[in-house]
Image: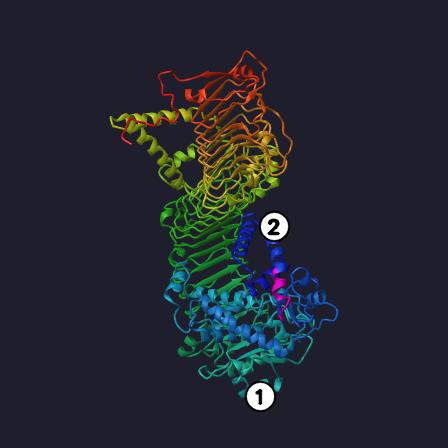
């Protein structure tokens, strides 16, 4: 909703004026917006509803003193909109009401205020109060998201620590802006440092349900940390506390964007220490939890920034736990700091030396026994990493064990070509190793196989040609392996099969790699492959025995292999996401039976001809798929979750298209169903008509121009089970009647009579065709919204067992409709109210068992003709009063059948809005009229004196029409011809003819009556059984 509509709804809600109609309209508007791919707003009815709300708001507040509070006004609004469009009485009036509006920016405030309005600037104390409140509210949200709603206090402490620690890493106002993107703190870096500090641990294990939900996705402890970190960051963004990427505020009105901007701009969190305090007052270091050192290259002095004591509690050990020297550019001072300060920080768990000019790693780094995270990211001058085996003075065994308690080691963007061979020898607790963008790295040390606790390994942008043979032997816990842009890498060791916990494999840009078959047999959950893969074959574990796979995500990009033209992953039990881009030789792709598959993305597949997505869980089809240039068959059978289809984006369409939500998609008869699909034909069977909301005017124009969708069958029903149930009930009734009629029972003659009558009724039904453009609606469980444009191109429609549609033309203008069948539509009062287009195209209509039908055509305004209508059949409509207005011409009507309509009084009636009365009514093509069981019918036309011109009228069948005492006068175009009348003898004898011209009137009809021995009593009861 637009801003003004949101304000109206908010005021009305506070006053208790919103009702169920509002919620219905809101839901309808949101559904229209979603199902049309945000193409339609669907707000027409809502705007009309708001127009009725405005006077009610004014009437409620006009005699009251009120206070209006609008928070976070995010866009300007005209000053008079509150009175003119919201219906609020003027605030400065005699009621002394007040308006308080808070804007998200000074610009919005200035554009929204009126002359004379007071503007109140929030004080720093006010903003601090809001920040503290937001932190408390975010803690509630976080505790709920992690399943620990009863431990808000713990997560409040976590939120405070994470928020304040993030402020330490972000640039402050006094720091000069740096355009280098390397200064931007990424989400992953921030979460790693939070985890190394121990912030992301819960006070108690998560509840069983939440834990099972996490681990059911293959997420273990390592990923739990990132999941919690992402929840915290997302919550901070929602509560305007922090947003990444972070850029410091440079103007006075920018600090209000987020709480982090405000605090960083005003320096309210970070303490400033002098060089003397830093180097000479050891107690000062013990009292500070985190230290960040900043030095600009043009300055010789440094400023030291630390967090305050507010984050320290008695249970925690005293001492500094984080030292951040990122981008510290003054080398002499940097070495001085490391040599003098590191020995004084025994509790240090995070050491960030990223983007510093170090040439070698000082020995003091390896004395930090509690170090959990070491970042050397971007230290491009670093030539060697300090190695214990190369030291003159070796550490004790106890020191070695504690020095290498690292969990996170970031060696991104180092220029080292070879690491010391025993670098990783004792890092048995290391969980994450990043070797990204190490452009000179040529060889990995053998000691990398000693990383038995490693969970994540990323190697990218190197000169590696191979990996150590036994590299993965000891990596029993490895979960994620990323090999990215290693242009010279030609093979991966088969020892990767030893990494039994590996579930995420990303290989991107390794163009020379031609062997990935070694990955078969691993329980992978995520596989992403990208690059110039000319000689690749998919692992057999992915192509065969898919029922035993664990794969959830498979993304392939740049597969240029000509050896494989088909991908078949039928029935994969765990696959959830599939992406295939730039695979020019793939002709067939089948994901049929992958029941957990929700996301499919295909692009740049120039040779793809056949695609099978049957029996999957996809919710929407990307527009790129049906527009693939060579795609000629697209199968979507058994896709019960599909809710949106990109009709509005179609530029072409497959020759064979089958979208059927009812079929199972992988049953024993699936192959037969596929074999029965027709070429140049679209078959659509769905439950929800809203799938066609995106079928817009542009799509209609392409269809009208013959671009695609020329032959289609669309069925909309809850499920085929219900359709079959209705059909089975009708078949059972017919079979039972036949059985009873054939039996020698006391009622056999009655059943035979009924069956004969039913057969007679069916034999006179008009020939309703199922055209090449057919839409069928069966027992829909909601109003069939979204079909307006589709029905404009449909040539035949069948609507059965409907309780929502009151007028067929409410659905659409029905521009091309030729054949129409309506059955059991008990809410329908008039079939047509608008006939501008349908009157020109409609040919055949059959209407049966419409309990609420009053008129067949009841025009709103202008009365249109039905120029093409040939056959009209109505039966079992107990409330039907009349059929057509006499002003509506029926030049093509051939047959008219009206049966068992007990309330029908006239066939042609005088329309209320037309005072002109014509004494002549033309039916130039009428050949047969059948009237049966119409006890109240008195006249064919309510104007008794009207003359009907029907030159080719041959037959009139009348049964059970005891009130019909006068037949219409006919214009004598052919005096020698007469209409043959079949009816009861008693009825014929009671007919009234014109006195002045009885011969002409009566001579227009030729009776064909029952034999004289038949009963002449038109109300004779059945006497063949005991009543």
Q: Of residues 1009 and 862, which is closer to you in this image? A: 1009
Q: Residue furthest top?
A: 976
Nearest to N terminus: mark 1 or mark 2: 2
Q: Of residues 793 and 669, which is closer to you in this image? A: 793
Q: Position of residue 885 (x, y in %)?
A: 58, 32
Disc 2 crowd, CA 10 A, few/some/many (<14, 14-19, 20+): few
Q: Over which residues does the magenta segment extend?
A: 56-66
Residue 366 at least partly seen: yes
> Could you give the CA–CA distance between mark 1 and mark 2, rounded to whole angstroms?
73 Å
Q: Of residues 1005 and 111, which is closer to you in this image? A: 1005
- Examine the structure image and report whether residue 710 is included in the region drawn in magenta: no
Q: SS of the residue at dot 1?
A: helix
* Tag of residue 280: 1
Q: Position of residue 346 (x, y in %)?
A: 48, 81
Q: Is residue 822 above or below residue 456?
A: above
* Tag of residue 44: 2
Q: Is residue 955 above or below residue 358?
A: above
């Amino acid at each position: 909703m637009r801003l003004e509509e949101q304000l109206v709804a908010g005021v009305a809600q506070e006053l208790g004026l919103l009702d169920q109609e509002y919620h219905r309209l809101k839901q309808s508007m949101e559904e229209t917006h979603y199902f049309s791919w945000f193409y339609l707003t669907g707000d027409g009815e809502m705007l009309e509803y708001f127009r009725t709300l405005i006077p009610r708001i004014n009437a409620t507040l006009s005699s009251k003193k009120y206070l209006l509070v609008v928070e976070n006004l995010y866009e300007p609004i005209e000053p008079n909109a509150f009175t003119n469009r919201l219906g609020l009485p003027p605030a400065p009036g005699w009621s002394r009401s007040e308006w308080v509006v808070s804007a998200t920016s000074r610009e919005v405030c200035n554009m929204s205020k009126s002359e004379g309005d007071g503007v109140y600037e929030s004080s720093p104390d006010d903003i601090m109060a809001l920040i503290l409140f937001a932190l408390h509210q975010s803690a509630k949200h976080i505790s709920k998201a992690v399943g620990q709603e009863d431990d808000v206090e713990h997560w409040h402490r976590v939120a405070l620590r994470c928020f304040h620690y993030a402020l330490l890493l972000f640039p402050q106002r006094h720091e000069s802006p740096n355009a280098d993107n390397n200064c931007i703190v990424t989400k992953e870096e921030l979460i790693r440092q939070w985890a190394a500090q121990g912030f992301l641990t819960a006070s108690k294990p998560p509840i069983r349900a939440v834990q099972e939900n996490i681990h059911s996705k293959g997420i273990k402890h390592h990923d739990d940390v990132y999941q919690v970190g992402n929840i915290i960051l997302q919550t901070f963004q929602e509560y305007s506390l922090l947003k990444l990427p972070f850029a410091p505020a440079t103007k006075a009105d920018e600090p209000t964007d987020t709480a982090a901007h405000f605090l960083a701009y005003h320096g309210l969190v970070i303490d400033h220490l002098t060089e003397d305090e830093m180097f000479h007052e050891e107690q000062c270091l013990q009292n500070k939890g985190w230290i960040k050192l900043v030095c600009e290259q043009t300055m010789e002095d440094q400023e030291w920034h630390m967090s305050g004591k507010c984050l320290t509690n008695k249970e925690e050990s005293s001492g500094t736990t984080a030292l951040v020297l990122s981008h510290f550019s003054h080398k002499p001072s940097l070495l001085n700091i490391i040599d003098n300060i590191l020995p004084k920080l025994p509790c240090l768990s995070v050491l960030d030396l990223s983007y510093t000019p170090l040439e070698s790693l000082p020995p003091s780094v390896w004395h930090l026994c509690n170090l959990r995270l070491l970042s050397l990211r971007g230290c491009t001058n670093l030539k060697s990493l300090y190695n214990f085996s190369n030291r003159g003075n070796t550490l004790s065994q106890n020191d070695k064990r504690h020095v290498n308690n690292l969990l996170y080691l970031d060696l991104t963007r180092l220029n080292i070509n070879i690491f010391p061979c025993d670098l990783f020898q004792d890092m048995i607790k290391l969980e994450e190793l990043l070797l990204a963008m190490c452009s000179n790295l040529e060889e990995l040390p053998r000691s990398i196989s000693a990383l038995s606790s490693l969970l994540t390994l990323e190697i990218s942008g190197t000169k590696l040609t191979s990996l150590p043979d036994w590299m993965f032997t000891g990596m029993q816990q490895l979960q994620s392996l990323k090999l990215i842009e290693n242009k010279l890498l030609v093979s991966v060791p088969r020892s990767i099969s030893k990494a039994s916990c590996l579930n995420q494999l990303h290989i991107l840009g390794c163009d020379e790699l031609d062997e990935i078959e070694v990955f078969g047999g691993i329980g992978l959950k995520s596989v992403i492959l990208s690059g110039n893969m000319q000689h690749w074959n998919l692992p057999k574990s992915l192509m065969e025995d898919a029922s035993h796979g664990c794969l959830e995500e498979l993304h392939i990009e740049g597969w240029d292999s000509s050896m494989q033209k088909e991908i078949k992953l039928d029935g994969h039990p765990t696959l959830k996401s599939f992406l295939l881009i730039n695979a020019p030789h793939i002709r067939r792709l089948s994901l049929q039976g992958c029941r957990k598959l929700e996301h499919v993305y295909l692009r740049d597949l120039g040779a793809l001809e056949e695609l099978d997505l049957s029996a999957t869980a996809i919710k929407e089809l990307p527009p790129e798929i049906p527009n693939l240039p060579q795609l000629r068959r697209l199968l979507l059978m058994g896709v019960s979750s599909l809710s949106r289809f990109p009709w509005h984006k179609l530029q072409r369409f497959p020759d064979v298209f089958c979208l059927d939500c009812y079929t199972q998609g992988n049953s024993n008869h699936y192959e037969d169903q596929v074999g029965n699909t027709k070429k140049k034909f679209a078959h659509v069977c769905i439950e929800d008509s809203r799938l066609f909301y995106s079928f817009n005017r542009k799509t209609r124009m392409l269809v009208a121009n013959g671009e695609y969708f020329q032959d289609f069958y669309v069925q909309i029903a809850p499920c085929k089970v219900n359709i079959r149930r209705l059909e089975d009930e009708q078949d059972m009734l017919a079979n039972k009647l036949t059985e009873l009629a054939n039996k020698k029972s006391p009622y056999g003659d009655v059943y035979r009579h009924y069956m004969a009558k039913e057969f007679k009724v069916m034999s006179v039904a008009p020939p309703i065709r199922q055209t090449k453009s057919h839409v069928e609606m069966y027992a829909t469980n909601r109003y069939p919204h979204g079909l307006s444009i589709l029905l404009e191109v449909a040539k035949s429609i069948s609507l059965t067992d409907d309780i929502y549609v009151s007028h067929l033309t409410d659905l659409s203008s029905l521009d091309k409709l030729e054949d129409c069948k309506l059955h059991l539509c008990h809410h329908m009062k008039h079939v047509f109210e608008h006939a501008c287009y349908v009157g020109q195209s409609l040919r055949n209509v059959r209407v049966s068992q419409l309990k609420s039908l009053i008129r067949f055509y009841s025009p709103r305004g202008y009365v249109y003709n039905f120029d093409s209508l040939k056959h009209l059949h109505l039966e079992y409509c107990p409330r039907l009063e009349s059929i057509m207005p006499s002003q509506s011409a029926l030049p093509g009507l051939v047959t008219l059948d009206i049966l068992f309509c007990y309330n029908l009084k006239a066939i042609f009636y005088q329309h209320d809005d037309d005072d002109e009365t014509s004494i002549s009514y033309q039916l130039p093509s009428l050949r047969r009229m059948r009237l049966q069981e119409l006890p109240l019918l008195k006249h064919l036309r309510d104007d008794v004196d009207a003359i009907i011109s029907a030159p080719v009228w041959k037959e009139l069948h009348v049964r059970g029409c005891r009130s019909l005492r006068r037949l219409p006068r006919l214009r004598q175009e052919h005096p020698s011809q007469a209409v043959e009348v079949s009816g009861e003898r008693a009825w014929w004898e009671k007919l009234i003819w014109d006195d002045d011209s009885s011969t002409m009137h009566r001579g227009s009809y030729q009776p064909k009556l029952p034999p004289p021995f038949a009963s002449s009593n038109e109300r004779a009861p059945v006497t063949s059984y005991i009543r």
